[in-house]
Image (spheres, rainbow, N blue to C red):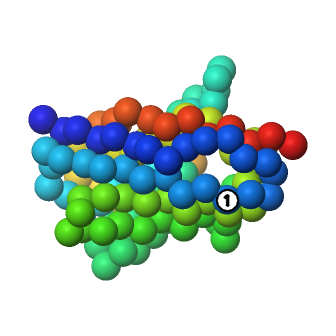
């Protein structure tokens, strides 16, 4: 059974930084992703990390967010810098449930199909 638990969220002012983590078990995959969902909005893919730590980001966070992973600890990280109020959302990690490219597709979930417990990130102006 896949278990994914995100932690590390909190409240910061615009321009600040946060690092969220996701501890997982019950899966075997080279690909993991970060998603976020704000109230009243669709779930949005933020970052994906795959083989050889190749990363993919949604355009709005490129150069601001960095995804990394520690395979020995089965932990995924998302370093978020220069945060903006529009980054406010529940952040969760995900693993694929079908084959395909380990990448973020704007407006779609792509190959990801299993999400874990999220952590709230709130950015105030």
| Camera-nearest residue between 17 and 45 | 17
| Picture residue at 49% right of the left edge, 52% below the top | 20
Q: For this rendering, which residue is in front, 78 or 13?
A: 13
* Residue at the disc numbered 1: 17
Q: Residue at x 67, y 71 (%)?
A: 63
Q: Name the image quarter holding residue 109.
A: top left
Farthest residue, direction right: 125
Viewed as shown, does residue 125 lie left or right of 64?
right
Q: Point out residue 120 in the picture as x, y percentages from the top left corner.
A: 56, 35
Near mark 1 (Cα within 10 A), the count class, few <14, some 14-19 or many ≥20, is: some
Is 36 placed left or right of 117 in the picture?
right
Q: Residue at x 87, y 43 (%)?
A: 125
User: Can the viewer see residue 48?
Assistant: no
Q: Residue 58: give x, y in percent of width and height.
A: 59, 56
Q: Is residue 32 above or below residue 98?
A: below
Give SS at disc 1: loop
Image quadrant in which you'd find residue 42 = top right
Q: Nearer the viewer, residue 118 or 43?
A: 118
Residue at 74% across, 42% down: 123
Q: Is residue 83 left or right of residue 115?
A: right
Q: Which quarter of the image is occupied by the N terminus? A: top left
């Amino acid at each position: 059974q896949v278990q994914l638990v995100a932690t590390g969220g909190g409240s910061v002012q615009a321009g600040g930084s946060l690092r969220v983590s996701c501890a997982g078990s019950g899966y075997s995959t080279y690909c993991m992703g970060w998603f976020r969902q704000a109230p009243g909005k669709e779930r949005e893919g933020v970052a994906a990390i795959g083989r050889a730590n190749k990363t993919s980001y949604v355009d709005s966070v490129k150069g601001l967010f960095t995804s990394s992973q520690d395979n020995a600890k089965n932990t995924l990280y998302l370093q978020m810098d220069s945060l903006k109020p529009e980054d406010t959302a529940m952040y969760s990690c995900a693993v694929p449930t079908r084959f395909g490219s380990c990448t973020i597709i704007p407006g779609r979930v792509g190959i990801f199909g299993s999400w874990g417990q999220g952590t709230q990130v709130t950015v105030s102006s």
